[in-house]
Image (tube, rainbow, N blue to C red):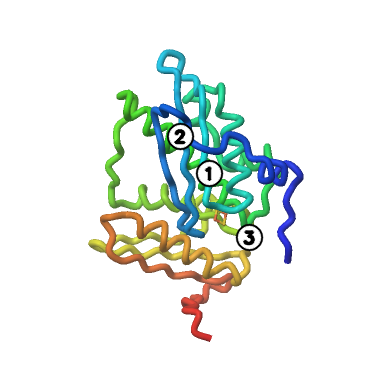
């Protein structure tokens, strides 16, 4: 089935704003999506006195939704302060674009996270923030899993209360996810996103994801061996 995009998404995809790199940028960040493997880089220049973003540009190796969200994010960020941009989220930017298909929400999450990472780099450089030390605990895992979007609803799996439990045993983590009303067809996509997201944690050697369907029966991993 063809994906239907809003006119604003199509406008930003066919005519993206602020593409490229900022000359003499004072911060840069690249983020990749665990869901699709695409990448996005933002560069920016900030006025050190006012904290206003004077210039911001992006390069995307992502899809139409990703390019459109990144483009819209730069339009909104230019002229805003660092503090204002830190309050951006994927949902509000998607709304500015006239909405995104729920299966494409992870693309806008990638765009917003990459922009916020560039802001964080700027703050670290200017002594306004510290490099975060990743703690191997449930709180960090939940924070990371907020980047995993349920394609059926466009909401992240933590706020949708789909996480049944998280158990860390040395360098191994077990995560159980309850699909509830979500169709089983999304199980493998969610399993893959959770696994790849948690594999970015250097303190973990193994990630085991168990998915339960609406009758609380385990959906076994589909290895694609049909
Ligand atoms: Fe990869 Fe959209 S599918 S960014």
* Residue lying at 23% horizontally and 62% vertically, measured from the top left: 170
Camera-side residue of 146 and 197: 197
How packed mark 1 is, by other alpha carbons closer than 10 Å (few <14, some 14-19, many 20 or more), is: many
Whether residues under marks 1 and 3 lie with C-beta atoms below 8 angstroms apart, the answer is no
Residue at (42%, 35%) from the top-left corner? 118
Disc number for residue 152: 3
Mark 1 → mark 3, Cα distance in angstroms: 20 Å
- Residue shown at 51% from the left, 43% from the top: 59
Label for residue 43?
2
Q: Is residue 203 above or below residue 94?
A: below
Instruction: Name which of mark 2 and mark 1 comes first in the sequence.
Output: 2
* Residue 111 numbered tag: 1
Q: Please indicate whether residue 142 sits to the left or right of residue 217 in the image.
A: left
Residue ranking furthest to the top: 49
Could you tell which of marks 2 and 3 lies nearer the N-terminus?
2
Taking the spot 57% from the left edge, 73% from the top edge, the residue there is 215
Q: Is mark 3 within 8 Å of ligand 1?
A: no
Q: Where does the image place residue 129, in percent across and percent down from the top left?
A: 33, 29
SS for dot 2: strand
Mark 3 Cα shell of 10 Å, populated few (<14), some (14-19), many (≥20): some
């Amino acid at each position: 089935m063809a994906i239907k995009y809003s006119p604003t998404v199509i406008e930003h995809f066919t005519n993206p704003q602020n593409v490229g790199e900022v000359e003499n940028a004072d911060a840069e960040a690249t983020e990749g999506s665990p869901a699709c493997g695409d990448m996005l880089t933002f560069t920016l220049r900030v006025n050190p006195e006012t904290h206003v973003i004077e210039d911001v540009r992006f390069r995307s190796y992502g899809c139409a939704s990703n390019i459109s969200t990144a483009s819209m994010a730069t339009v909104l960020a230019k002229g805003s302060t660092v503090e204002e941009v830190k309050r951006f989220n994927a949902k509000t930017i998607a709304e500015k674009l006239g909405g995104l298909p729920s299966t494409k929400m992870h693309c806008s999450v990638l765009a917003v996270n990459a922009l916020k990472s560039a802001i964080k780099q700027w703050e670290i450089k200017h002594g306004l923030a510290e490099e975060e030390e990743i703690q191997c605990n449930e709180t960090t895992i939940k924070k990371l899993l907020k980047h995993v979007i349920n394609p059926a609803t466009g909401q992240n799996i933590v706020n949708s209360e789909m996480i049944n439990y998280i158990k860390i045993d040395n360098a191994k983590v077990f995560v159980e996810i309850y699909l509830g009303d979500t169709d089983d067809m999304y199980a493998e996509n969610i399993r893959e996103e959770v696994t790849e997201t948690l594999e970015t944690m250097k303190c973990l050697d193994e990630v085991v994801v168990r998915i339960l369907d609406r009758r609380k029966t385990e959906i076994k991993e589909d290895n694609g061996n049909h």
